[in-house]
Amino acid sequence: MIYRIVCRVLPLVMIVTLLAGCRSKKDNVQPDIRIEEVAENVAPWRNVYLPVKVELLSPKRFAMSGRATMVWNESIYLSMRMFGFEVGTAYADSSEAVVTLRQPQKVMIELPLSDLLKKHDVDVAVLQQAMLGSREALALLPSAIRWQADSDERKSEVMLSAVYKGKEVAVKLTWDLGAAQWNMDDVRRWSPPGADYRRLSVESAMKIMESL
């Protein structure tokens, strides 16, 4: 039962999370001052590895924890776990976004990002900063996406919500800044899924959301 829920909800959570920041008419956003202070480094940071809790608040409630690896203005990599096992990943760079599920079956969702980012004059750095809770980056989101952000020295909370075909979709990210590792010499790299993964279209994933 729990894996069936994961299969239905995780792609939606990750797609909304990764694509929420795809709009900007301004120049690149530099790291938020509060985040800089936590990193204790001169901006921009090179990379960061930190725990994150991802919660779907609506139309259903579901939560899981994981780890995120971000390379500044290059890539975003989320690894989500349940009971100590990796059940899904999400990866995004300037060319594509890929969501994978390992349980109950191996499924992958691919979304080209290059044209979308260019259309809205956005780069990966803006997405990273919006996800981490920079109000300056979040302010660049389209008006259809509502957001709330709150942070201190230990954590950053970001909530994104929008209405899709009459249903509110709300996602909350809670980042453990106190456990973050900044500017590492070696970073965890994403491995593309193998040929044994079945491809699922973005349209199919959104139809899953409509059935929730």
Image (cartoon, helix red, strand yellow):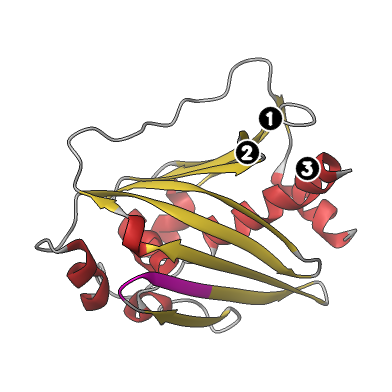
CB of mark 2 within 8 Å of CB of mark 3?
no
Amino acid marked by disc 3? Cys
The C terminus appears in which quarter of the rendering?
bottom right
In the image, taking residue 24 as reference, residue 185 lies left or right, namely left
In the image, taking residue 195 as reference, residue 150 lies left or right, namely left
Range drawn in magenta? 153-158
Question: At x 19% / y 49%, what residue is drawn?
Answer: 46
In the image, taking residue 92 as reference, residue 125 lies left or right, namely left
How many other residues sit within 10 Å of disc 3, few (<14), some (14-19) or many (≥20)? many
CB of mark 1 within 8 Å of CB of mark 2?
yes
- Give the residue at mark 2: 88
**Looking at this view, is 126 or 9 the one in front?**
9
Amino acid marked by disc 1? Arg
Label 2: element kind: strand
Amino acid marked by disc 2? Gly
- Give the residue at mark 1: 102
Distance between the alpha carbons at the discs numbered 1 and 2: 6 Å
**Looking at this view, is 133 or 95 the one in front?**
133
Relative to 188, residue 176 above or below:
below
- Give the residue at mark 3: 7
* Residue 122 visible here: no
Question: At x 68% / y 22%, what residue is drawn?
Answer: 197
Q: Main secondary structure of the magenta part?
A: strand
CB of mark 3 within 8 Å of CB of mark 1?
no
The percent position of residue 179, horizontal first and vertical second, equals 34, 56
- Tell me where residue 209 sits by quadrant: bottom right
